[in-house]
Amino acid sequence: MQVKFDNLSKMLKSSELKQPDLLFETSWEVCNKIGGIYTVLSTKARELKKMLGDNLIFIGPDVWSDRNPSPTFVERKTLLKSAASSLSLPENITIRVGRWNIPGSPIVVLVKFQHLMGHLNEIYGRMWNEYGVDSLHAYGDYEEACAFAVASAIVIKELTKHLKGEKGRTVAHFDEWTTGMGLLWLKSEMPSIATVFTTHATSIGRSICGNGKALYEYFDGYDGDQMARELNMESKHSLEKAAAHNADCFTTVSEVTARECTQLLGITPQVVTPNGFEPDFLPGQRTYNQQRKSGRERLLKIAEALTGKKYSDSTFIIATSGRNEYRNKGLDLYIDSMITLGEKVTKEDQDILALVLVPAWVKEPSGELLMDLYHDGHDQPAVDYLTHRLNNEDSDSVCCRLRELSDSKRGKNVKIIYVPCYLDGNDGIVNIGYYDLLPALDLTVFASYYEPWGYTPLESVAFGVPTITTDKAGFGQWVLSNFTNSLDKTGVFVLPRTDRNYTASCEGIAEAAEKYMEQSSNEIQKARSAAAATARKADWQYFIKDYEKAFDIALSNVLKRHKA
């Protein structure tokens, strides 16, 4: 398609390249909470809204129904009414317009893309011919992601025509490989739109780690294309690589991942865009104190029902959380370090409750636990380490490891409890949302082996809960570059992880936790205050400037393309 660039050069003078007139951001996680990208988008929306007002439009998948509505999408049929009613959308693509119920309340367009899946072979052929994307070996979620991505690009193209025309400064920002095909399609169809592509974690890097291979020791010897063939990741890797190379600006979330992109994708991101946090998610002091009290009461009651043992108010509560990637997220190291901690703590009256707050394939709340929760005697022997029954308890990695550990190995002071569900406040056992539960914790541990950024430790310190993380997390690297590495002074301790220091890392976590537990209540309160102060430095108001730089680069490259 031939696109006119009339007067574009005049509009794109370098002095004016501060922000776009119209910004679209597309992700599978818009109004669709699956992982960390949802947190990235939902927390930065307010700052983007300050820049652009209602010229900021998020694009997400319409995977909802009347029986299963999105909990955060509020439909507003009057928004974009004139443009939406004029759209020429092929293949039964439909949209719903509304607002995302998050700080900033940005406009969001949900795209019904499913009918496009019948035309993917034609799209794949075009992507191969124009960009060399190999979709031949696609499987799993590849088809659904590509259909959504292309449908979103079609919507962006049509909305751009009606909202700003082809002469405006429009930026389309695509997140993760799942939206990469949309970027490529849009570049072919409407090259006057500046494109930004962000990889939050390379698909091949995650796969290397998830398959138990040593990423860091042999890092400089890895070839992304070769590993994609070996690990059956050719299609996702090919798509991600093409999107990174063809975007007008390629970004990633940390220096850790930027190095990974250079090695595995063959391109260095032009901008690193760290992930910030939105302070509006934080409760006031009175609410915080209430949440800490009620959260601890609930967790200790669950522990008592599972063990038949009474837990005092002085019980030290530690937790890890996040995506269920046993090795990548360091769940293995966390569990083993808790065992080591239990061996170190010898005080008879010091109980430690170690929680694994990681969603898994949940079947239902534990019926036995539900009965015990409402039985006041607590005179039964230990029941279980699971709050919910799983469909795959025989193969779930956390379950398998906890089964291996007898009570004697765990130490009498430590009880490890696996809460394998999304803490949305309606899980049937805990019934408290994750952010509402965070204040109840005394310490968190995120022992990541592979972690592009690390929202979980940032969320922890934002809620005043000191955390132990690793230098393999982007957040950990950010702390090492800007703060004192100390639970006391910063609320964060960053542990070095390599391919060979598992045992030393285990000891390091246990020692840091033991030392922290032995501090006075005054010292612990200072550490909690220091944690909150560190998080304030990661406010989006400081990090949004990196996105402004990315938009500037993308718009500049549109101008270069026009001149060429």
Image (spheres, grey):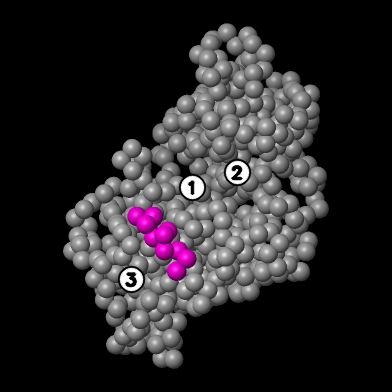
Between the residue at mark 1 and the residue at mark 3, the CA separation in whole angstroms equals 27 Å
Q: Quadrant of residue 396?
A: top right
- For the record, the magenta segment spans 112-122
Q: Residue at x 78, y 42 (%)?
A: 507
The kind of residue tagged 2 is: Asn
Q: From the image, tell me which residue sits under label 2.
A: 324
**Tags 3 and 2 touching, CB below 8 Å:** no
Q: Against 491, is 362 above or below? A: above
**Tags 1 and 2 touching, CB below 8 Å:** no
**Tags 1 and 3 touching, CB below 8 Å:** no
Sequence-first tag of 1 and 2:
1
Q: Residue at x 41, y 33 (%)?
A: 286
Q: Residue at x 64, y 31 (%)?
A: 393
Q: Quadrant of residue 79?
A: bottom left
Q: From the image, tell me which residue sits under label 3.
A: 157
| Side of 462 where 467 appears, left or right | right
Is residue 117 highlighted in magenta?
A: yes
Quarter of the image where the C terminus is located: bottom left
Q: Against 132, is 120 above or below? A: above
Q: Nearer the viewer, residue 377 or 83?
A: 83
Mark 1 element type: loop
Is residue 149 highlighted in magenta?
A: no
* Residue 483 visible in the displayed image: no
Q: Residue at x 54, y 50 (%)?
A: 455
For residue 34, the mark is 1
Q: Against 509, is 255 above or below? A: below
Between the residue at mark 1 and the residue at mark 2, the CA separation in whole angstroms equals 11 Å
Within-10-Å neighbours for mark 3: few <14, some 14–19, many 20+: many
